[in-house]
Amino acid sequence: MQPLHDDQGSSQAQWQEQRQRALEDLIAQTSDAMITLNRRFQVLELNAAAATTLSISEQEAPGLDCSAVLSCKNLNRMSLCGTSSCPLTRVLQEKRALPHDEIIIGTKPDHLSEVSVSVTPIVQQAEICYAIFTTRDMSALKVANRVRSNFVSMVSHELRTPLNSVHGFIDLLMQGHMGKLTEEQHTYLGYTQEGVQQLISIVEDILLMTRSDLGQFESRQEEVHFRGLVRQLVLSLHPQAIKADVLLRDALPGRLPSLYIDPLRIKQVLNNLIINAIKFTPPGGTITVTAQQVDQNFMRIAVTDTGYGIPGEDRQHVFERFYQSNHSQQSRMGGYGLGLSIAKLIVEQHGGTIGFDTVLDKGTTFYFTVPLYRGQSQGE
């Protein structure tokens, strides 16, 4: 029996060696760039695809700081190094993998790459020891998306003009400029005006998304006192909260530093998050807006509800465009699946990040970070 045992041991060793060789070949030959970083933000290793993408040799990179190799930027070309938006910082703080975030990597102007990145932490003895960056080039997909965005933008522009005309004429009718209306006529025109306004809002949202895809989305950042912005928004959404029988309130701390934001855009983010919370919070629930400074550069703003929570199968799709949940409340509440996508777009335009925590039948907290005012000039 002993020789058979030796044969089995030899076969097992050969099998393990074959698997190891296959794994090494996979990493070496894959077209996806793979970079391993330690907790000190130093490059440990990278594969051939990463060396080509970053225009650096495989022997030169190990030991260098990741800012000298990756130099991550968001799609608006704002540097993520040293901020809470840095992919590795997010993984270390949240202690979980970061899937499919779109960023720009590279330190040389002629070797910048727009990629989809996933960051996988490697845990040993209950502590993250290092992380693996895996990136996939998005250039070809971006070209196809740009063609699609141009078409959608053209159609949306053509729709906006007649819709605004219809809205204006309905308004004139309701004000009695074409003769006195009966109560029933006024009611039905009101329904019509509400539908047209909804269509205009959809067109405006689609235009905003396509402008972003085409690189034409801009924010006009300035010093903003956040407390006033929140209270103004809470007051404007109060009627919707009353109609849904939920309590809408802010729980802001006594002192808040000024923010460096585009007030109209951040108001749109909060508006989308609060309306979403109102939709998915049952009668008698509460929605609370809070804010807290997280470091010397960013403030964390959160909208917390006591609603239904987000089912597990929906969580990875929350920020996808036009995604519709199968939740029983979705069909009742309506919507077209752009609110959270737009919120993510605006937050990232400001160099911040957005995410959520949820517990079924307990509630959901959506949170995002925005920059503090540090004497920046407009457009900086």
Image (spheres, rainbow, N blue to C red):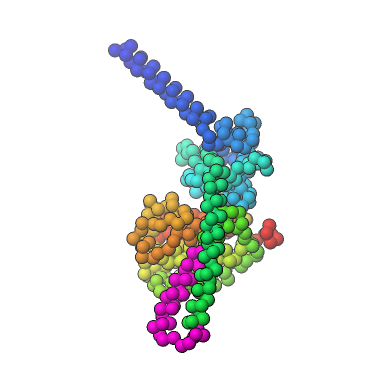
Closer to us: 206 or 359:
206
Chief SS of the magenta region? helix
Q: Position of residue 239 (x, y in %)?
A: 45, 75
Closer to us: 249 or 221:
221
Q: Position of residue 265 (x, y in %)?
A: 57, 63
Q: Is residue 126 magenta?
A: no
In the image, is 77 to the left or to the right of 32?
A: right
Query: Which quadrant would the N terminus be assigned to in this image?
Result: top left
Residue 28 visible, this orientation? yes
Residues in magenta, as a range:
175-204
**Which residue reaches farthest bottom?**
180
Q: Is residue 201 magenta?
A: yes
Residue 301 visible, this orientation? no
Compared to 20, does 226 lie above or below? below
**Which residue reaches farthest left?**
1
| Residue drawn at (45%, 57%) of the image | 322
| Residue drawn at (48%, 87%) of the image | 179
| Residue drawn at (39%, 68%) of the image | 285
Corner quadrant of residue 266: bottom right
In the image, is 58 to the left or to the right of 13?
A: right
Q: How many marks?
A: 0
Query: Which quadrant would the C terminus be assigned to in this image?
Result: bottom right
Q: Position of residue 254 (x, y in %)?
A: 56, 68
Q: Position of residue 318 (x, y in %)?
A: 44, 54
